[in-house]
Image: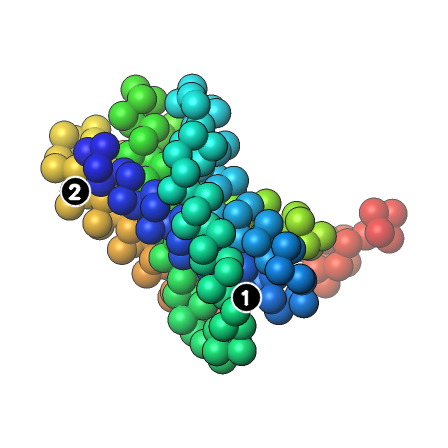
Amino acid sequence: METLVLVLDLVGTFVFALSGATLGVRRRLDLFGVLVLSLAAATAGGMTRDVLIGATPVAALSDWRYPAIALSAGLITFVWAPAIERLQQPVRMFDAMGLALFAVAGTQKALAFGVPPPMAAGLGMLTGIGGGIARDVLLAQVPLVLRADLYAVAALAGGAVVALGHWLQWPATPCAIAGALLCFGLRMMALRFGWQLPIALQSGGDGEPPDAMR
């Protein structure tokens, strides 16, 4: 189980770092900015999870592989930026893969530390969306996970599958695969068909905020 969580964490670190670095290149950040963004996107979610469950020292700070993988992905993106920029769909797939892998790995690690299944699923979601929140905050924009495309919902669904499997005492590996596939599938379907959760109407019913809150 520990090996499975580690593999998922490291693969998720790479694909999230690649996604974060790509956004940095699009915003025309310099090399340092791209590397910082890739590191934040790849490690923020896992660091938050580890602090909350008491898994110290935090893996992203104590294991050299996490920053090394994140910075390598950022450097690759920076050097081959023109080629990466032409790969819009693969970049979206990388982000969805990172979300799925982090959500599943986060849930698995929380369960291994004795966290109850419902809370473990929530921590898995936090692991998946934490990097995206950190990335978007550094770019001074409202985090994507809070505004569109079933991002956090997909992560929660993937974590819930893993948590449910643990509660029912099903084999961990098939549950992890099923959770990752569900999360990835929901995210890609949301991107493909524009699926979103309902948005509350403001006064006047036009979806705009009322004047007093602008």
Q: Residues under labels 1 and 2: Cα distance?
A: 35 Å
Three-letter amino acid code of the residue under disc 2 = Thr
Q: Nearer the viewer, residue 118 or 59?
A: 59
Callout 1 secondary element: helix
Q: Could you tell me if residue 86 is visible in this image?
A: yes
Check disc 1 and report the residue beneath it.
Answer: 78
- Residue 54 image offset from top left, x and y in percent: 42, 19
The image shows residue 30, relative to residue 85, as above or below, that is above
- Residue 58 image offset from top left, x and y in percent: 44, 28
Check disc 2 and report the residue beneath it.
Answer: 173
Residue at left 67%, top 67%? 28
Q: Is 205 displayed left or right of 93 in the figure?
A: right
- Residue 46 image offset from top left, x and y in percent: 44, 37
Q: Could you tell me if residue 195 is visible in this image?
A: no
Three-letter amino acid code of the residue under disc 1 = Phe
Q: Is 101 displayed left or right of 200 in the figure?
A: left
Residue at left 66%, top 66%? 27
- Residue 8 image offset from top left, x and y in percent: 30, 45
Callout 2 secondary element: helix
The image shows residue 160, relative to residue 151, as above or below, that is above
Other residues around mark 1 within 10 Å, as few (<14) / some (14–19) / many (≥20): many
Task: State yes or no: discs 1 and 2 in contact (Cβ < 8 Å).
Answer: no
Residue at left 29%, top 51%? 180
Q: Which mark is residue 64?
A: none
The image shows residue 15, relative to residue 157, as above or below, that is below
Q: Is 143 displayed left or right of 124 in the figure?
A: right
